[in-house]
């Protein structure tokens, strides 16, 4: 729990990132999957929390692997000096295969064109590429179709024999792991086991077979295989709000988003507030201006609904969220410019949570934290000694 001011004096707003909470979340998640290796998924700037700092903290907490979506993210991790295993998976033709091979990054291949490009890159780099093969077990996104899998695994094995490739992993991704009784889960587990057997038939011996995201890590032990790949839960957000909040899974939210009031003023009743005058003051009142808007990732859908802790109480965004700012009506309460408004945090100092914002905006908490913009400085606390 935070005591004292959250925001350094010269800043208008900050996303406070509690790295001690992140490390403790990694430990809690590892305890749910004791036999499995741990991949800390740090794509999308670590879901808005700051990729390099969170990757370092996850490593300190024992994460053997880092997971990135794009090769550019993976290369940035390496350039920041993070050693060890890094996997990325979202490739397009002509991508930086050679750079990744030379940086010792594990790359994901879902189709023949990708295998051909990585083999060419390995030849050019004169070192074998570490390749993980992805099967589509039913999500319908990336990954080889089961019909194409035997051919892809045989081609990868042939590349292994000629020394251009080492197949280090076979993996897939669930479609509905956040709905623990969904019938697709058993189907996708079966499809994954079939794909593993076919990969073995082709002669592949991957180091890691993996399938579980955060909900799979927390609720599906049969899906842990050799490694789990949690993202959102590592940032202290419940991946299955229906089953429980973060504390029910031993997790603590990592991000607190706070701003200093930029204006506090008395206005008469009948005063329109923000673009379109969607809100009109019901009587004489105090309006406070929060200097964060949709350019900072405060969803415009929060207009009239987003919750904010100001002057000791939950208030609601009054009228439209603008690009840089929004207003809250303090009713009869007082506040001063510079006072802190907390949009969301762990919730134990009375502030709303990212989950509260997700509910108010009709989205998921993943999207709330991930979209917090680059204009909001991240301020880190809880670094390991
Ligand atoms: C984003 C992602 C994850 C992490 O998912 P969470 O639901 O955030 O745990 C795991 N694996 C892949 C392939 C992903 O794209």
Image (cartoon, grey):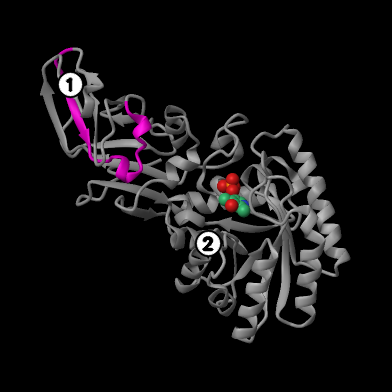
Q: Is residue 194 left or right of residue 328?
A: right
- Residue stretch rendered in magenta on the structure: 283-303
* Tag 2 secondary structure: loop
| Crowding near the residue tagged with mark 2, few <14, some 14–19, many ≥20 C-alpha atoms within 10 Å | some
Residue 302 located within the stretch drawn in magenta: yes
Question: Sequence order check: which comes first, mark 2 or mark 1?
Answer: 2
For the point 17% across and 38% down, which residue is it? 262
From the top left corner, tell me how far across and down residue 58 is, in percent: 54, 59
Residue under numbered circle 2: 70
Looking at the rendered image, the quarter that the C terminus falls into is: bottom left
Which of the pair 172/20 is nearer the observer? 172
The residue drawn where x is 56% and y is 45% is 233
- Say whether marks 2 and 1 touch (CB < 8 Å): no
Q: Quadrant of the N terminus?
A: top left
| Residue 244: in magenta span | no
Q: Vertically, is 361 above or below 64?
A: above
The residue under the point 81% across, 56% down is: 195
Q: What residue does disc 1 label?
A: 272
Q: Indicate the position of residue 158 as horizontal and vertical percent values.
A: 80, 76
Q: Position of residue 367 (x, y in %)?
A: 46, 41
Q: Nearer the viewer, residue 250 or 317?
A: 317
For residue 334, say whether it is visible: no
Total labels: the figure holds: 2
């Amino acid at each position: 729990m935070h005591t004292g001011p959250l925001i350094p004096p010269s800043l208008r707003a900050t996303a406070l990132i509690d790295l001690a909470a992140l490390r403790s979340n990694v430990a809690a998640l590892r305890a749910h999957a004791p036999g499995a290796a741990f991949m800390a998924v740090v794509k999308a700037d670590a879901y808005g929390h700051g990729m390099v700092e969170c990757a370092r903290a996850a490593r300190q907490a024992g994460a053997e692997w880092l997971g990135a979506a794009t090769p550019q993210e993976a290369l940035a991790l390496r350039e920041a000096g993070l050693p060890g295993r890094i996997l990325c998976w979202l490739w397009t033709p002509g991508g930086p295969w050679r750079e990744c091979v030379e940086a010792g990054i594990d790359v994901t291949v879902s189709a023949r064109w990708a295998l051909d490009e990585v083999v060419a890159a390995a030849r050019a780099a004169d070192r074998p590429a570490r390749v993980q093969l992805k099967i589509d077990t039913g999500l319908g996104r990336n990954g080889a179709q089961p019909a194409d899998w035997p051919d892809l695994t045989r081609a990868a094995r042939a590349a292994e024999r000629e020394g251009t490739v080492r197949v280090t992993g076979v993996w897939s991704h669930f479609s509905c792991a956040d709905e623990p009784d969904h019938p697709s889960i058993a189907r996708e587990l079966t499809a994954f086991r079939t794909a593993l057997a076919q990969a073995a038939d082709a002669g592949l011996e991957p180091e890691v077979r993996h399938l579980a995201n955060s909900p799979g890590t927390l609720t599906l032990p049969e899906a842990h295989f050799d490694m789990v790949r949690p993202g959102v839960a590592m940032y202290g957000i419940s991946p299955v709000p229906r089953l429980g909040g973060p504390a029910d899974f031993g997790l603590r939210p990592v991000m607190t988003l706070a701003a200093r009031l930029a204006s506090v003023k008395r206005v008469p009743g009948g005063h329109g507030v923000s673009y379109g005058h969607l809100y009109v003051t019901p009587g004489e009142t105090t309006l406070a201006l929060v200097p964060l808007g949709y350019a900072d990732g405060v969803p415009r859908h929060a207009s009239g609904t987003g919750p904010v802790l100001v002057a000791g109480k939950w208030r609601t965004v009054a009228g439209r969220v603008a690009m840089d700012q929004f207003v809250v009506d303090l009713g009869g309460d007082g506040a001063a410019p510079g006072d802190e408004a907390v949009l969301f945090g762990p919730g134990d100092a009375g502030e709303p949570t990212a989950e509260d914002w997700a509910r108010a905006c009709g989205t998921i908490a993943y999207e709330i934290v991930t979209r917090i913009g680059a204009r909001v400085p991240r301020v880190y606390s809880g670094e390991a000694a």
